[in-house]
Image (tube, rainbow, N blue to C red):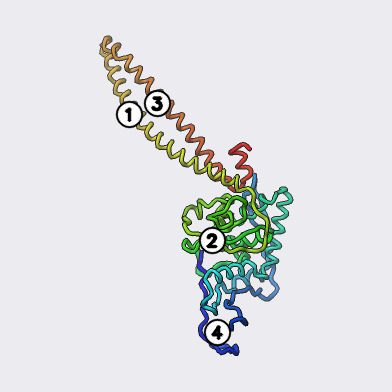
Amino acid sequence: MRNPLPLLFCGLLMATGIVLAGCVAYLPGLSPPVAYPRIVPERGELTDINVTCTFLFGDGQVTITVPVDQSIYRGAKEAGKTVTIYDEDIPDAEWQAGLYRTMIDDPAQEPFYTALLSALRSLKEEQNLDSDLYLELIVVLVQSIPYDTVTANGPKYPIETFVDGKGDCDDKSMLLAGLLAREGYAVALLYFEPENHMAVGVVCPGYTYRDCGYAFVESTNVILVGVSDGLCDGRIILDSDPLVIPVGNGILGYGSCGETHALWEEVKRIRKETDLLAAELNLTEGEIEQKRTELDEWGTIMEHLEATGQTREYNRLVSGYNEMVRSYNTLLAEYWSILAEYTMLVDRHTYIIGHQYDRQGTYRAVFGA
């Protein structure tokens, strides 16, 4: 994620509003303390850009094609991505929140949102999705956009992220929040300044991330709503409380955090159990190897006794040798039993991790409900 750096006002000007050296006077009560960027569509007749997205959702793969006004896209590309601060007393949190909301809600992007949401609503109707599943559809769409490393050009407008088909955490989070807000969900951006990370929050009754009022929604990779582990493929650990930036005026919440949390608790339980089983397997393997060595040594002795006709000594040792074989076979059976349990848990873990785009189906497959 890129930190949006402000451009500071470069001097005091006369109250008449004279422009000097490119700076505009800040007049308390008459002019805004911060100037935010805006999109100016590029002039000229430009054909639409048809953007096709294919991603896994539910029990299969879905594809949408969305026409995007190229003049707006190019205008977004050329638009500034910084703020100009005229009142240096304005808190950082205020101008930061203002910048992100301005970039999400720039009116030039509304036709883009309308076209994209029209395609998503068609899928909602085709698959008869309830409000939770529809939220998940939107979330998975954005999560499936490839994560891009930080560039020096500042955050992207949502229209850029969608057309470019890539973005980092703030790019993808702004796109996701913008879409969810326009579908009536109560959402916010969650900005973690110390970790230089951004996610999305959605209201989920009974569940709140760090008492911020919202459940956590990661945008960088496909992960269940409400789960804050596994961020950016494990590259980020969040220790700070987020700056909460509400987006839109939606009132719809998400009601399936109980299932997503149950699935993630199962993931954590499996990880603990497989760690213990792996240690037990290693220990048992060592015991098996030791017994195998002892059996080989005894076998060599028994073969020698039999070959040299030392029948009495052979008969004296055979019962001990047979007991050692039984002990070895018992230990081997125990090993295979532990390995079977370990393999079953690994398969269960792999299934959950690999099907996070299908909360409903995964929950049923894992818990049978």
Nearer the camera: disc 1 or disc 4: 4
Q: Pick the residue in front: 325 or 125.
A: 125
- Which tag, 1 or 2, sits closer to the chain's start? 2
- Which tag, 3 or 2, sits closer to the chain's start? 2
Three-letter amino acid code at disc 1?
A: Gln
Q: Pick the residue in front: 167 or 219.
A: 219
Three-letter amino acid code at disc 2?
A: Met
- The label shown at residue 290 is 1
Where's residue 32, x and y in %? 60, 78
Q: Quadrant of residue 157?
A: bottom right
Reading the image, the residue beneath label 3 is 331
In this view, 256 is above or below 149 = above
> In this view of the protein, can residue 168 be seen by the observer?
no
Q: CA distance from mark 3 to mark 4?
A: 82 Å
In this view, 331 is above or below 29 = above
Whether the residues at callouts 3 and 2 have beta carbons within 8 Å, the answer is no
- Which tag, 1 or 3, sits closer to the chain's start? 1
Q: Quadrant of residue 178?
A: bottom right
Q: Residues within 10 Å of mark 2 (few under 14, many from 20)?
A: many
Q: Pick the residue in front: 174 or 71.
A: 174
Which residue is drawn at the image coordinates 31% and 24% (left, top)?
294
